[in-house]
Amino acid sequence: MTSQAVTRATHWLTDAGLRPTRQRVALASLLVGDGQHRHVTAESLFSATKDSGESVSLATVYNTLRAFCDAGLLQEVTVDGARSYFDTNTHDHPHFFWEDEQRLTDAPAEDLVISNLPNAPEGAEIASVSVVIRLREK
């Protein structure tokens, strides 16, 4: 990890009110160290962590991703109700899910138009709308 990646990760954590522990900084550096947005699974982040020479357990990766979501640093995107992807872009936007590659990418938000939503049941309000567009090769 470069010192710039560590600095960026440390600021990302402290700005959200999270203590920058060694393991959090290691994971955050992989997520935002280069300033680019990422879509990761816990398993892919765990693998990237091992490849970088860091020692972090898979359970720690899961717990840290949950803490990052709770702090508003990541958005969790669930595909098929079972597989979760974690997105560093927390603004509302749609996603493409590439079925053949099991990969999630951003879809252009400006092209999506939702003209009507059903009314929420009495006593409830719509908290968010998640759009995942599934793609496969022709």
Image (spheres, rainbow, N blue to C red):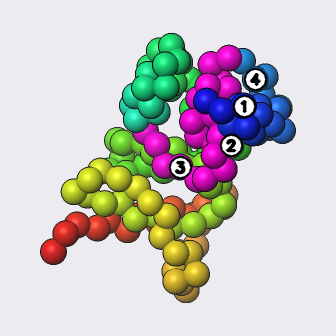
Q: CA distance from mark 2 to mark 3?
A: 12 Å
Q: Earlier in the sequence, mark 2 or mark 3?
A: 3
Q: Given contact means CB atoms under 8 Å apart, are the residues at marks 1 and 4 in contact?
A: no
- First reached walking from the N terminus: tag 1 or tag 2: 1
Can you identify the residue that label 3 sits on?
Answer: 38
Residue highlighted by disc 2? 73
**21 shown above or below 85:** above
Secondary element at image label 3: loop
Q: Earlier in the sequence, mark 1 or mark 3?
A: 1
Please check the rendered image and state whether residue 24 is part of the magenta-colored stretch, yes or no: yes
Query: Neighbour class for label 3 at 10 Å: few (<14), some, many (≥20)?
Result: some
Q: Quadrant of the N terminus?
A: top right
| Residue type of the residue flagged with mark 4 | Pro
Viewer-nearest of discs 2 and 4 = 4
In-front residue for pair 9/118: 9
Of the residues shown, which amino acid type is indicated by label 1?
A: Ser
Q: What's the magenta region?
A: 22-42
Q: Is residue 56 above or below residue 114?
A: above
- Would you name the residue on which mark 1 appears? 3
Is residue 68 visible in the rendered image? The answer is no
The residues tagged by marks 2 and 4 sit, at their Cα atoms, a distance apart of: 13 Å
Q: Nearer the viewer, mark 1 or mark 4?
A: 1
Helix, strand or loop for disc 2: loop
Q: Are marks 2 and 4 in contact (CB under 8 Å)?
A: no
Give the percent coordinates (x, y) of residue 79: 37, 51
Q: Which tag, 1 or 4, sits closer to the chain's start?
A: 1
Residue drawn at the location 49% of the way across and 64% of the way down: 106
Helix, strand or loop at label 1? It is: helix
Say whether residue 96 is left or right of residue 119: left
> What is the distance, in whole Å, between disc 1 and disc 2 at their CAs?
21 Å
Q: Given the image, on which type of amino acid does mark 2 rest?
A: Leu
Q: Are marks 3 and 4 in contact (CB under 8 Å)?
A: no
